[in-house]
Image (tube, grey):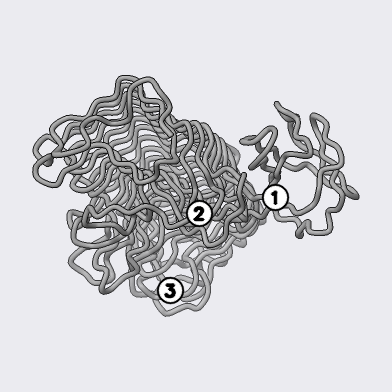
Amino acid sequence: AMQAETIVDVENFGAAADGKTDDTEAIVLALKAAAAVAPATVVFSKGTYLVSKTLVAPDNLTWRGAGMDKTEIRLRTPLSTSMVASDGRNLQFQHLTLSAGRNIRQAPLLFMGSARNIRLDHVKIDAWGAAALDAQDVEGLSILSSELIEDGSFYGNSRQVFLAGNRFRMTGDGESVASLWGGRDFSMTDNTLTNADESLEDGNGIGRFFVAQTHRGSMRNLYWAGNISQNAGPRDCKKVDCNKGEQICFEIYGSRLLQTDIISAQSGKVTFRSLAEMPEDVPGGRDLVIVGGRGAGQHRHILSHSGTTVLLEEPWTVIPDKTSRLALAAVASNAAIYDNRFEGRSSYSLHDSDTTGVLLYGNVYDVVVDSNRISRMRHGMMTVALDSASGLSPYFLQYSNNLVINSNSGLYVGTTFAERGIPAVWGGLGNVYRKNRFEQITHIGIEYDTWDQYGSDFDGTVFDSNSLVDVRFGFVDGYRLMWTHDGTFKAAPGPHSKRLRTVLYHNRFDGGSAGGIGSRGFVTMHPGNSWVNIGSTWKRFETGNLGPSAGIIEK
């Protein structure tokens, strides 16, 4: 409110706003004058303001235009650095356009470094061919009712980030609207994702709303709701990397098994024989994860470590003992993905891309994926465990009430890329798939995949009251299913990750219009896996209409 009381008008410092005159110096003088009386508002009246060098935004200022379609600050010449930069605090941009004029390629249009309390409200950022923002370590960032034309933005390990009601238009086969490397308290609500101009070679994105990786430590408290994507995915595998296109993508692989013994454990701490292998600290910190033995499935954030003792943020529910296997991991946890509409490209069936509505991959815990509509994907939803020798395992995930339609495969659950294996390290625990609907799936309804290494077993996976209609292959338990396109399913050769005590409760599999010659309802290639089938049915497939025997565990 105090910023609005003191007004500094750039026209009073000689800004012409005629789209011809270089207004850089006038704007710099106005910003300097406003900084001297801050908090203040710098007013940009209707017009086009041309600039030719980086504008450094002082603290405690609001930049206010006459409207996104009326006030434009445009870069007139190529620039190797950002157009606008701030590393301070309490900065707002309102009702204007910041345009790079395609004069930035290597730098983001807006650089915010370690800024605090930044707000963009009804702002258009035209960074065609470059990133809109670089927010390495920001705390308190709101982007509201704005339009961003960009290759994607980087949010580093930022905290308290809120993106709401925005339109994201992707260019340059850009990786993702938002990339997070270890932050927390992040939300995206009521945003739309489209390609900027599909008639242009550089007017498309790769199809990702969000990518999480934990290069800077653990992340938690993440939320998506009401977001909509349209025709999002790799455009042509001959021109772009098609191992992309996961619209909400958690690639969490910063984990390693501890090779030291537990000496003692209490509710809030663990003492090891040695901690020589502890890596350097990262901003988001790390977690201890019990991946085998007593207490498996739990993770606790590390507060500190001293000597050979690790102190935890919260106590264990089940205290580990000497049978427990622990991993030191940067993890993603406590997330909800609710009521979004994720749409891939109409060409999804023509390219072997990795388009997916939601991918939870590696060390992901305590996530709910609920009431989303997912269409035109290679895989509707995916849960992926990886190398058991590193403890890359997803636990306690819930996918419920989702609709997957017009896609190649509906749901992928399993182990992949497991190049090394250790027995007795769990790949999946307590994951639940409930009341999801899969319709018009051209290949496999539910893929239950395995790899040819020990460990990374799944235990207690629950498939409850799911409905699959018009699907050629209903439920397939096999080997490397992701690369099996012709229905010739195989068993893993030798050692492989197992699927134990899988619960199939009142699911309905109906081949329908896809259930002709060669269709199969229930397929398991691994007789050592075990099942509890209660009330699930398979019908209108050529074979596999019996499923596991009802009410018993098969071995």
> What label does residue 104 carry, if any?
3
Q: CA distance from mark 3 to mark 2?
A: 52 Å
Which residue is disc 2 drawn over? 495
- The residue lying toward the viewer, choosing from 461 and 331, is 461
Q: Single out the mark in the foreground, 1 or 3.
A: 1
Confirm whether residue 418 shows in the render. Answer: yes
Q: Amino acid at mark 2?
A: Pro
Q: CA distance from mark 1 to mark 3?
A: 40 Å
> Which badge, 1 or 2, is on the more N-terminal residue?
1
Q: Single out the mark in the foreground, 1 or 2.
A: 2
Q: Where is residue 296? Give x, y as percent.
A: 64, 36
Q: Where is residue 497? Give x, y as percent.
A: 49, 48
> Which badge, 3 or 2, is on the more N-terminal residue?
3
Confirm whether residue 4 shows in the render. Answer: no
Q: Is residue 214 above or below residue 3?
A: below
Image quarter where the C terminus lies is: top left
> What label does residue 409 carry, if any?
none
Please state if 117 lies on the left or on the right of 67 as rendered.
right
Q: Amino acid at mark 3?
A: Ile
- Is the residue marked by circle 2 packed among few (<14), some (14-19), or many (20+) residues within 10 Å? few
Q: CA distance from mark 1 to mark 2?
A: 26 Å
- Is the residue marked by circle 3 packed among few (<14), some (14-19), or many (20+) residues within 10 Å? many
Image quarter where the N terminus lies is: top right
